[in-house]
Image: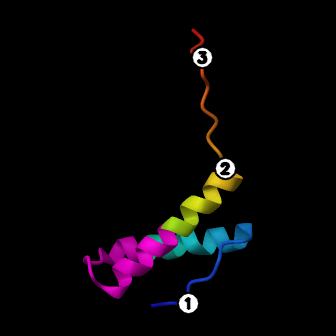
Amino acid sequence: MKTIKPIRTKADYKAALKRVDELIAINPKSGTTAYDELDVIGTLVSAYEDVHYPIEISDSVNF
């Protein structure tokens, strides 16, 4: 398992996405350290995206 760090910058974000891709490629099984690492990094990526790339939800539909 690599050292997991907070995602504070765009470079950190890109590195985390790269690591997610690496982990997905090996298809880790539940209960393994790789699976746990993927879970934690995925949570960090999601939190970073929520702050820096929010999806605005419209309360109206325009046609």
**What is the x, y in percent for residue 55?**
61, 41
Q: Which mark is residue 17?
A: none
Q: Nearer the viewer, mark 1 or mark 3?
A: 3
**What is the x, y in percent for residue 49?**
62, 56
Magenta part of the chain: 23-42
Say whether disc 2 or disc 1 marks the residue closer to the N-terminus: 1
Q: Residues within 10 Å of mark 2 (few under 14, many from 20)?
A: few
The residue lying furthest to the front in this view is 59
Main SS of the magenta segment?
Answer: helix
In space, the residues marked 2 and 1 are separated at their CA atoms by 25 Å
The amino acid beneath tag 2 is Tyr
Residue on which the image places disc 3: 60
The amino acid beneath tag 1 is Thr
The quadrant holding residue 63 is top right
Residue on which the image places disc 2: 53
Residue on which the image places disc 1: 3
The amino acid beneath tag 3 is Ser
Does the magenta segment cover residue 37?
A: yes
**What is the x, y in percent for residue 53?**
67, 50
Q: Nearer the viewer, residue 16 or 41?
A: 41
Looking at the image, do the residues carrying marks 3 and 2 touch, with CB atoms under 8 Å apart? no
